[in-house]
């Protein structure tokens, strides 16, 4: 089956609802070589994912996410990646919750849902989500502004090895400048208390190096 035939088959069978004009654009880009067909998914991996294996669901979502990021002609893969991440997120996978939160934030502009998903992942000790949650608290994205909690979660993320971008760091310095010494002390206390109770946070990068490492337990009940 040629690339074009594979892509045509995928459009017909995917069940993804996209604008017909976008479909036509993607088809033209495939024919011209500007876009690629779907990433190759091992049949055993897909089988495991469909059977409910959360790691397989996340890995397939990641493959489609990477394909979507590989070029603007691959926008069809966003929906596919989001669907697989949602399956894994519903089963409590912190990495999937964090990536799905990014989809809700950037694609759907649903900041409440992004906040909720980041909160679930952050409570499991995912440093990437902790940084994002801190930014949500600091910027009042999907929740009320709370600089003490913003300080707590960003401090935990930094402890877990996450260093934000220059814009995020600048914002954090502005928030710290608005905080009293007592507020900063409270943020530090909350972060230290969290670490003492649940252990040090981990980033997605460190988890990938230790794939069998479990996240922090008891994440089903969101805490502030």
Image (tube, rainbow, N blue to C red):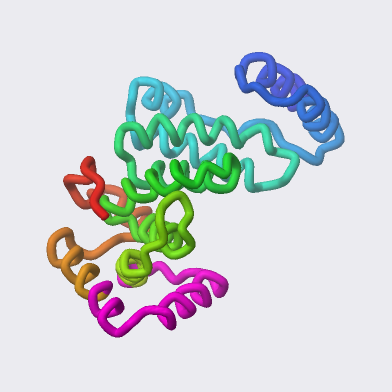
Depth check: 129 or 150 in front?
A: 150
In this view, 142 is above or below 45 = below
Q: Quadrant of the N terminus?
A: top right
Depth check: 162 or 46 in front?
A: 162
Depth check: 201 or 8 in front?
A: 201
- Residue 89 on image: x %, y %: 37, 36
Q: State whether the magenta stretch is mostly helix, strand or loop.
A: helix
Is 153 left or right of 64, judged from the image as shown?
Answer: left
Magenta-tinted stretch: 159-187
Answer whether residue 198 is visible to the viewer in this image. yes
Q: Residue furthest left?
A: 197
Q: How many numbered badges does the structure rendering display?
A: 0
- Residue 127 on image: x %, y %: 35, 60
Q: Quadrant of the C terminus?
A: bottom left
| Residue 167 highlighted magenta (yes or no) | yes
| Residue 84 highlighted magenta (yes or no) | no
Q: In the image, what residue occupies the spot 69% across and 20% down?
A: 11
Is 35 left or right of 50, judged from the image as shown?
Answer: right
Q: In the image, what residue occupies the spot 36% across and 59% down?
A: 130
In this view, 97 is above or below 82 = below
Depth check: 144 or 171 in front?
A: 144
In this view, 70 is above or below 25 = below
């Amino acid at each position: 089956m040629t690339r074009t035939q594979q892509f045509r088959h995928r459009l017909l069978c995917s069940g993804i609802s996209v604008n017909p004009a976008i479909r036509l654009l993607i088809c033209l880009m495939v024919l011209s070589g500007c876009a690629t067909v779907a990433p190759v998914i091992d049949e055993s991996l897909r089988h495991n994912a469909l059977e409910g294996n959360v790691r397989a669901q996340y890995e397939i979502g990641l493959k489609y996410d990477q394909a979507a990021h590989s070029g603007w002609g691959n926008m069809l893969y966003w929906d596919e990646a989001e669907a697989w991440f949602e399956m894994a997120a519903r089963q409590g996978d912190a990495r999937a919750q964090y990536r799905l939160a990014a989809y809700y934030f950037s694609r759907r502009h649903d900041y409440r849902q992004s906040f909720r998903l980041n909160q679930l992942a952050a409570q499991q000790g995912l440093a990437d989500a902790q940084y994002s949650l801190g930014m949500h608290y600091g910027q009042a994205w999907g929740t009320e502004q709370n600089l003490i909690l913003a300080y707590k979660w960003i401090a935990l993320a930094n402890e877990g090895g996450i260093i934000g971008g220059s814009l995020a760091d600048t914002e954090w310095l502005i928030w710290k400048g608005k905080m009293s010494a007592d507020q900063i002390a409270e943020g530090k206390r909350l972060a230290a208390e969290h670490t003492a109770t649940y252990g040090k946070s981990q980033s997605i990068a460190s988890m990938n190096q230790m794939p069998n490492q479990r996240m922090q337990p008891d994440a089903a009940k969101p805490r502030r």
